[in-house]
Image: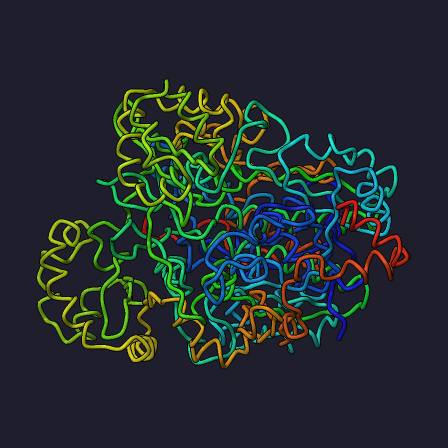
């Protein structure tokens, strides 16, 4: 929670696991909303998922994972409470009275089983906005199916279109769709708040990963209706050449080069020192370069393989040619541009001092009026007492009672297996 | 029901998919979005293949059609003083301007944020550039592939460990930048309701790429290991694509109560999967070819939709590797009413994707319009709304301003 952010005064209760939804509510937390992550003591996978300092989970492993800082509980508060226990359910419903948004990413049916479906919550608080983030949605024959982000990369058409030239389809990513959905969650919730400022009424949002994914392959969806198929081309392009990844000096170093016009090709030739092959007729026009792109890629690759990729990218950019190294995470952490732009955020997690300060990716947008930073990360159940006394009106005796009854927790159960 | 952003006007000065997709997200929620294109040629994507119907035609590029729904279109040469003045007149009545020029180009044309903001203090200007508005690479040339490279995506995410880096299809970094831009716009609009002040938002496509596959920066700073591509190599149970009767599928070990091989052996009726060599993830990777030889023939007996239905019934988690055609014909999306038919005068009727979320059961695309033809709304907007006479419009056309 950022002091006096634009969403100051907006409260979100989120029953969230894994990646997509926490990524989405993280934007609201960065913008100043009071995002309360309601965590189950029986589902601590996110806190076990790491990454851990040096790859090893420490004594207080449940507060040490880097993913918590990157999205899990960053700028959020944590209430570790069993909402399936009648006492937990009662507290949750009290909190709903003082809440603007309730989000979940359970499969359809779970919120209803808990008594937390939109109709029930709306009866308590007519201004409530609920958002359920699922793979396939609340309706349709696949509504009960489970998912991972990569299975939805597949289902939406993206992975089918992805692959090396002439090769089989390949999964597009491990969790690209988590981020696309997270962004869409943030967008939908901000839209809902904007709308509620006008109407005063809450609403129910059924947001799906599959549909978010399909919007990202829109052109192919239209083409398919006219029998147009897209061949897999790896890093090559439908009409541009050179447009690929080329080897550079060193182990597993590569540079991407994109040429979109004859002028750019002329500049690239000069940058290469005008070798004889580059002047051959078979590379003289956009069309010829595309038709002969395999030979072109090989000859260009012979040249790039003699150069350091970082230096070569700078040199080509000075000739106004689109080029960039295939940067590794280590390169990115040391990248002067990202550093100059303040994109690399260092955060010392006070919940896990042993871990020391670590560097995280920042937000890819800047708005001086809406500054964002990581100001806190919530340890497991760290905010139980504060939330329950301030928002649910419970006394310290009530809170101790809930703890004794096994409704709220500030550490994993003693028999919880370590990651 | 009026759509959420129907009181807002967006001007789009964009020649990249990032800007086009960002303003599409706003347009699809009802914002009156005017795409401002250079006269004669229009948006670059109008000229990029493939084209619906085959032959090149500026109104039939699939990329243009897909990313410009719900917009009205005018042509305006903002490099000419008359064009610039008309743009500034439009900007006075606008809430948001989306642009994706190289940094500094808008200022050269005399329409930088200071000018826009002086004319309209509440205006939100969104600038999407490959490397953002400042920093050592700000003037560098970009491209989706370069953003995938410099965003770490190529090295670490898609592709095989033993092969060169390889990216994902269809300009996903442009789309990710656009989605971040739309979040920033909504945050700026909410703040404007409190302060009445607009904003200049600086979106970097490279940074959108870095922040997107979250397995990059902090896993390195926590563990010292550089994430590397190849996560689906030899990963039969959790990443590889495997053929079915009418397509492909990718399996997972999720939903098996921690006993993946038992669950899949039972489902596929293949007791060979219980071989102790396959009991651990490491063992499955080491003996992946043997595992593949057992699993693939069993899966190849299933059709995609049958496989989805039966695994779902047992709580197993798979992903059908659907072709775009299978997506369009998906019975699931049909029942949800996700696709909406729009009839474009040049490209004809087609099914277009909805927005990715339904609010109170409504598909925001239900009242949609297809992408504009080049200059389609010149008379309606410049004549009808700015009050130019037909004679003035004729003069502007002769001078190639519109």
Query: Is A256 situated left or right of A10 in this image?
Result: left
The image shows residue A130 at horizontal and vertical percentages of 63, 67
Determine if residue B31 is in view: yes
| Total numbered circles | 0
Q: Is residue B379 left or right of residue A361?
A: right
Residue A263's place in the image compared with A91, above or below, is above
- The residue at the point 88 percent across, 52 percent down is B392
Residue under the image location 56 percent in, 43 percent down: A74
Residue A408, visible in the rendered structure: no
Residue A50 place in picture, x, y as percent: 39, 43
Tell me: A112 left or right of A284: right
Residue B129, quarter of the rendered image = top right
Question: Residue B381, located in which quarter of the rendered image?
Answer: bottom right
Quadrant of the frame with the N terminus of chain A: top right
Q: What's the residue at 49%, 74% (across, down)? A: A108
Q: Nearer the viewer, residue B295 or A372?
A: B295
Residue A297 vs residue A12, the one in the foreground: A297
| Front residue of B301 and A62 | B301
What percent of the width, then of the height, locates residue A335? 47, 25
Q: How is the image coloured?
A: rainbow
**Residue B245 to residue A9: above or below:** below
> x, y (%) of residue B5?
75, 62
The residue drawn where x is 11% and y is 53% is: B287
């Amino acid at each position: 929670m950022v002091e006096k952010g634009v969403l100051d005064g907006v409260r979100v209760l989120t029953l969230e696991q894994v990646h997509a939804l926490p990524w989405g509510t993280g934007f609201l937390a960065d913008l100043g909303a009071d995002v309360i992550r309601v965590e189950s003591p029986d589902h601590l996978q996110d806190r076990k998922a790491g990454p851990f300092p040096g790859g090893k989970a420490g004594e207080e492993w449940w507060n040490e994972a880097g993913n918590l800082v990157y999205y899990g509980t960053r700028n959020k508060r944590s209430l570790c409470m069993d909402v399936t226990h009648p006492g937990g359910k009662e507290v949750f419903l009290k909190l709903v009275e003082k809440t603007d948004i309730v989000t979940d990413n359970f499969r359809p049916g779970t919120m209803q089983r808990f008594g937390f479906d939109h109709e029930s919550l709306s009866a308590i608080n007519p201004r409530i906005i609920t958002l359920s983030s699922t793979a396939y949605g609340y309706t349709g024959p696949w509504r009960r199916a489970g998912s991972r982000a990569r299975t939805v990369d597949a289902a939406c058409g993206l992975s089918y279109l992805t692959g090396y030239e002439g090769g089989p389809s390949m999964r597009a990513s491990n969790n690209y769709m988590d981020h696309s959905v997270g962004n869409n969650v943030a967008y939908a919730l901000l839209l809902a708040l904007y709308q509620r400022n006008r109407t005063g009424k809450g609403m129910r949002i059924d947001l799906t990963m599959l549909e978010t994914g399909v919007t990202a392959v829109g052109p192919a969806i239209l083409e398919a209706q006219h029998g147009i198929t897209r061949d897999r081309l790896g890093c090559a392009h439908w009409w541009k050449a050179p447009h690929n990844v080329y080897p550079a000096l060193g182990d597993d170093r590569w540079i991407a080069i994109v040429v979109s016009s004859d002028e750019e090709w002329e500049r690239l030739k000069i940058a290469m020192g005008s070798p004889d092959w580059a002047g051959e007729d078979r590379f003289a026009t956009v069309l010829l370069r595309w038709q002969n792109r395999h030979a072109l890629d090989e000859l260009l690759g012979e040249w790039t393989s003699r150069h350091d990729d970082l230096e070569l990218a700078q040199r080509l950019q000075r000739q106004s040619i689109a080029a960039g190294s295939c940067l590794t995470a280590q390169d990115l952490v040391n990248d002067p541009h990202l550093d100059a732009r303040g994109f690399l955020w260092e955060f010392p997690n006070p919940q896990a001092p042993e871990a020391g300060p670590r560097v995280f990716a920042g937000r890819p947008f800047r708005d001086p009026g809406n500054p964002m930073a990581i100001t806190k990360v919530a340890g497991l159940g760290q905010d139980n007492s504060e939330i329950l006394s301030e928002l649910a009106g419970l006394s310290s005796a009530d809170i101790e009672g809930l703890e004794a009854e096994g409704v709220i927790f500030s550490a994993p159960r003693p028999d919880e297996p370590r990651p | 029901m009026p759509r959420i952003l129907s009181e807002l006007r967006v001007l789009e000065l964009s020649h990249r998919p990032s800007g086009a997709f960002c303003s599409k997200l706003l347009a699809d929620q009802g914002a009156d979005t005017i795409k401002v294109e250079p006269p004669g040629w229009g948006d670059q994507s109008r000229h990029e293949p493939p084209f619906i119907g085959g032959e090149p035609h500026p109104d039939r590029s699939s990329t243009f059609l897909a990313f410009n729904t719900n917009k009205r279109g005018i042509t305006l040469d903002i490099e000419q003083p008359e064009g610039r003045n008309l743009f500034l007149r439009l900007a006075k009545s606008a809430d948001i301007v989306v642009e994706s020029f190289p940094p500094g180009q808008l200022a050269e044309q005399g329409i930088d944020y200071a000018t826009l903001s002086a004319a309209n203090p509440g205006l939100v200007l969104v600038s999407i550039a490959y490397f953002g508005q400042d920093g050592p690479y700000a003037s560098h040339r970009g491209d989706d592939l370069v953003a995938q490279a410099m965003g770490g995506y190529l090295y670490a995410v898609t592709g095989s460990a033993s092969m060169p880096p390889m990216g994902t299809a269809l300009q996903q970094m442009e789309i990710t930048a656009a989605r971040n831009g739309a979040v920033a716009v909504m945050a700026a609009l909410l703040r404007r309701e409190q302060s009445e002040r607009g904003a200049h938002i600086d979106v970097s496509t490279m940074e959108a790429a870095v922040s997107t596959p979250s397995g990059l920066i902090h896993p390195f700073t926590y563990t010292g290991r550089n994430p590397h591509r190849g996560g689906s190599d030899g990963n039969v149970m959790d990443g590889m694509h495997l053929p079915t009767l009418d397509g492909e599928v990718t399996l997972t070990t999720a939903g098996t109560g921690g006993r993946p091989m038992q669950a899949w052996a039972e489902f596929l009726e293949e007791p060979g999967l219980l071989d102790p060599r396959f009991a651990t993830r490491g063992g499955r990777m080491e003996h992946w070819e043997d595992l593949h030889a057992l699993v693939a023939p069993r899966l190849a007996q299933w059709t995609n939709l049958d496989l989805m239905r039966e695994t779902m019934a047992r709580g197993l988690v798979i992903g059908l590797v659907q072709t775009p055609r299978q997506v369009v014909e998906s019975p699931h999306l049909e029942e949800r009413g996700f696709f909406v038919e729009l009839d474009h005068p040049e490209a004809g009727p087609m099914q277009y994707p909805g927005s990715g979320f339904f609010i109170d059961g409504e598909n925001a695309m239900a009242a949609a319009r297809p992408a504009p033809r080049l200059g389609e709304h010149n008379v309606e907007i410049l004549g009808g709304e700015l009050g130019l006479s037909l004679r003035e419009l004729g003069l502007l056309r002769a001078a190639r301003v519109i």
